[in-house]
Image (cartoon, helix red, strand yellow):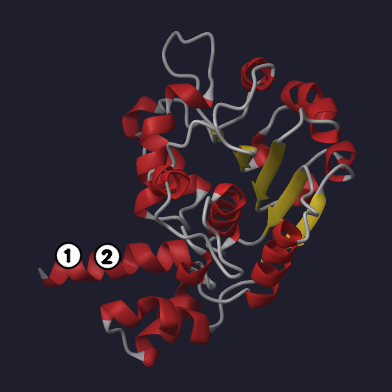
């Protein structure tokens, strides 16, 4: 994801770009916004920009080896953490067990919701769990960060929906958020930051992501030839949730086909 591919939130983009250009990179940041906002997309664009070999003043190059790995979210110094389910007899539940499926889910729709992610488990989710980030994940993060960066100046640990962390995981990560290893940046992407432990929130730089305007969505759906009237209708129907809008547009296209 490049900054130029994300409509709106121009002030936030300038803030993120400026932090890198001025070497004022906070080691733990909180991207918060409503469901279907640009919070995750902007976090990925920022992580890519941090490690781009040929960045401009306005965006990543999109062509260097680092950017090519970010195209598939497979950079070895990008660690992806997200809510998971304990399936079957599994004693350990960590993101690494589901990372390929989650990558596909996000690459298809970078504005997708937690509910859509959990729904993708289908009948495997027999007990109707909502997804959690368990203490096993915190232990895994500690082990990973005990090692040196693989190749990039910045190792990025992106935590999607950190409000799903249980208390044990939250407490185990407190010290890391405060003093991560050199060259490590935590990016937390949340819809409900008020649920996070106050002791965690106090350690994070806050970045609020605004909902998309009708103009933003008109720009985004330009390639789909949607009328402004249809875009307004979808925006009102979904409460400006771009992830849901993308799903509805895809369903319309499939119905026509």
Residue 218 percent coordinates (x, y): 42, 84
Kindly check if marks 1 and 2 are in contact, taking CB atoms under 8 A apart as contact.
yes
Residue 2 percent coordinates (x, y): 48, 62
Residue 144 percent coordinates (x, y): 62, 19
Q: Which residue is mark 2?
A: 250
* 209 over 228 or under it: above or below: above
- Label 1 and label 2: CA atoms lie apart by 6 Å
In terms of depth relative to the viewer, which is nearer, 11 or 206? Answer: 11
Farthest residue in the front direction? Answer: 54
Seen in the image, is 99 located left or right of residue 132? Answer: left
Of helix, strand and loop, which one carries label 1?
helix
Seen in the image, is 208 located left or right of residue 219? Answer: right
In terms of depth relative to the viewer, which is nearer, 157 or 231? Answer: 157
- Location of the C terminus by quadrant is bottom left
Q: Which residue is mark 1?
A: 254
In terms of depth relative to the viewer, which is nearer, 114 or 101? Answer: 101
Quadrant position of residue 206? bottom right
Seen in the image, is 61 located left or right of residue 211? Answer: left
Residue 93 percent coordinates (x, y): 53, 18
Of helix, strand and loop, which one carries label 2?
helix
Residue shown at 73%/50% (left/top)? 30
Seen in the image, is 65 located left or right of residue 189? Answer: left
Residue shown at 63%/76% (left/top)? 10
């Amino acid at each position: 994801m490049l900054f130029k591919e994300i409509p709106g939130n121009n002030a936030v983009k300038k803030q993120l770009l400026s932090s890198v250009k001025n070497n004022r990179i906070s080691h733990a940041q909180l991207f918060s916004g409503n469901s279907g906002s640009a919070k995750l997309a902007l976090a990925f664009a920022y992580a890519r920009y941090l490690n781009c070999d040929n960045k401009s003043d306005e965006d990543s190059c999109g062509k260097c080896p680092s950017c090519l790995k970010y195209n598939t979210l497979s950079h070895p110094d990008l660690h992806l953490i997200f809510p998971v389910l304990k399936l079957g007899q599994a004693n350990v539940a960590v993101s690494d067990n589901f990372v390929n499926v989650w990558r596909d889910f996000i690459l298809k729709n970078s504005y997708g919701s937690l509910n859509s992610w959990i729904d993708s488990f289908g009948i495997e989710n027999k007990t109707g769990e909502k997804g959690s980030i368990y203490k096993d994940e915190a232990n895994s993060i500690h082990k990973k960060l005990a090692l040196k960066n693989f190749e990039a100046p910045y190792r990025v640990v992106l935590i999607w929906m950190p409000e799903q962390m249980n208390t044990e995981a939250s407490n185990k990560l407190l010290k890391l958020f405060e003093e991560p290893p050199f060259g490590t940046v935590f990016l937390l992407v949340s819809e409900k930051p008020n649920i996070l432990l106050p002791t965690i929130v106090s350690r994070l730089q806050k970045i609020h992501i605004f909902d998309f305007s009708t103009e933003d969505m008109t720009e985004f759906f330009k390639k789909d030839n949607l009328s402004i009237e249809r875009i307004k209708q979808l925006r009102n129907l979904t409460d400006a949730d771009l992830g849901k809008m993308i799903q509805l547009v895809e369903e319309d296209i499939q119905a026509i086909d």
